[in-house]
Image (spheres, rainbow, N blue to C red):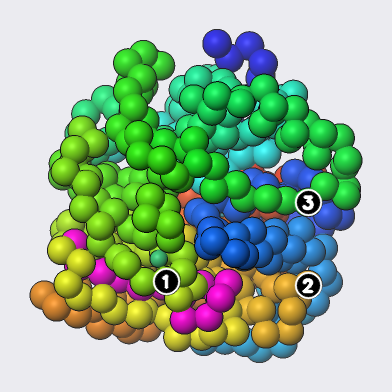
Amino acid sequence: MNDEVQCVLRFESGAFHTPVIPAASPSVRRSTLRRRAPHRAAPPMLLTALLLATLVVGTRADENDRAASPTDARPARMSPEEVARREARHLKNIRQVTRCFPRAGEGYFSPDGKQIVFQAYPLGYPFYQIYRQSLEGGQPFRLSPGRGRTTCSYFHPTQPLILFASSHRDPQIEQTEAAARRLEAQGGRRRYQWDFDPWMDIYTIRPDGTGLRQLTDTPGYDAEGSYSSDGRRIVFTSTRDGDPDIYIMDADGSNVRQITNAPGYDGGPFFSPDDRWIIFRSDRRKEHMLQLFAVSVDGKHEVQLTHNLGQVNWCPYFHPSGKYIVWASADYSRGPQFANFDLFTMDVTLGETTVRTGRVERITFHRAADVLPVFSPDGKRLMWTSTRTSDGSSQLWIADWVRED
Ligand SMILES: [Ca+2]
Ligand SMILES: [Ca+2]
């Protein structure tokens, strides 16, 4: 099943890689774009193009370290030593996790923290596939069917199940693949498109690759799914009513209910550890300028968590304590060529009808793109997708997470 890759997973103890800033490489282009861009009737691909421009250009811009903080926009060009010193405040033992794939990203931990599930480009295939990998060594194991687009995988918290989105039932799959290969053959000229593939649906599969089961079958894009902490529900993004919104369904795909209904992209949702709130990102305030929001699981109470329309904020994720979230943000006020995605945390207090926001802290300072952060279930490690690799490709990275409270 996995003969197309020989990807060795290994850790490098204690290493902080001196940044080797890549030229814009195709490998950067698609991979980090994961938690979704908006699809409206008219301008569907623009936000993705914006994010892409940042991820490509941002990794090679010499001065983009000045970018990016909701709280700290100091114009500084940091030395690698200074970057390491600042990141060491919360990140110890930073190490690259995935290798050998042309690119990989958006990883999530298994409930016991010993495995990860992520998306990666198989050699010779134009779309991401979903892989499971032990963190203790061994080869990545492909879970997705091997055809079509895939994205957004997630472990069930208590059962041996992994969910992901896949378009492999696309009846025009040959043409879809051929079009992607033609684009890829155009090399540096190829334009990224995040396709809100209408054939994208949410599936579950057992960790051994058996028991593929389709949970959604509504026309339109259904993806970006994740389980509630008790495993009874799935929150996801769907365009089934023509606009990307947040939905919840039971874990078997039944009982679908719509949670957000605002014009614009609402996506990338995750439950809070107590399953009372959902965090997500939306560009409803200003097109493309994603902001973070929280909504109660009944959809009745909505709170905007970030208020910086010069920034793109995305991929929020809770620490298992429920006391703070981590996300990626970049300053677009000087244009995408200077934007540099970095990770931040924000303290939150989850109430009955509102969410209070608190201290914001910058976590990464590297001029490569740092996006899609998640905590391990025990809260002791942080995994994210970064182009801080020696070849500039986006890969998964893990660090020990250091914070007292
Ligand atoms: Ca919407
Ligand atoms: Ca960065």
| Residue at 86% in and 35% down | 185
> Mark 3 falls on what kind of element?
loop
Is the residue marked 1 within 8 Å of ligand 1, measured from its CB? yes
Three-letter amino acid code at disc 3? Arg
Image depth: mark 3 or mark 2 in front: 3
Residue span colored magenta: 285-297
| Residue 292 lies in the magenta-colored region | yes
Q: Are marks 1 and 2 in contact (CB under 8 Å)?
A: no
Instruction: Calculate the distance from the C-alpha at mark 3 to the C-alpha at mark 1.
Output: 26 Å
Q: Name the residue under label 2.
A: 337
Q: Are marks 3 and 2 in contact (CB under 8 Å)?
A: no
Q: Name the residue under label 1.
A: 263
Local crowd size for mark 2, using a 10 Å CA cut-off: few (<14), some (14–19), many (≥20): some
Q: Is residue 259 visible?
A: yes
User: As drawn, is 271 to the left or to the right of 291?
Assistant: left
- Disc with the residue nearer the chain's start (1 vs 2): 1
Image depth: mark 1 or mark 2 in front: 1
